[in-house]
Amino acid sequence: MTEMTEYDISAAMSLLDEKLKNAQPKRRGRKALLAPYADQLRRYVAAGWSRKEIVAEMKALGISISAGTLRNVLGEKSVKRESKMVKTIA
């Protein structure tokens, strides 16, 4: 078994760096798939649609999503979590 030299590791790391710079990371999950549409979804909420109504419409169109995932996409914090924080501060 040959021992790797510092040059070998350096060369391997530079090749890895070049490869990773050229490769685009793949988006995964429903949140990542809906992220480009977050502004559009926020406009629906601002227009008066509830998250549940939006989820129901999306499911009717064949897009499976939960209300929690939609909340995460919209960047909203959980009301339950905020009320917990208020209780601990008060």
Image (cartoon, rainbow, N blue to C red):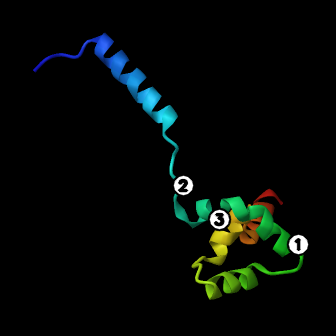
Q: Is residue 19 above or below residue 59?
A: above
- Tell me the element at label 3: helix
Q: Residue at x 48, y 40 (%)?
A: 23
Residue 3 place in picture, x, y as percent: 18, 16
Asked whether the residues under the numbered discs 2 and 1 touch, taking CB atoms below 8 Å apart as contact, a structural biologist would say no
Q: In this rendering, would 42 be left or right of 19?
A: right
- Tell me the element at label 1: helix
Q: Which residue is mark 3?
A: 34
- In the image shown, does 84 or 13 lie closer to the viewer? 13
Amino acid under disc 2: Arg
Residue 1 place in picture, x, y as percent: 10, 21
Residue 82 occupies quadrant: bottom right
Q: Which residue is mark 1?
A: 46
- In the image shown, does 86 or 10 lie closer to the viewer? 10
Q: Earlier in the sequence, mark 2 or mark 3?
A: 2
Of the 4 image quadrants, the one containing the C terminus is bottom right
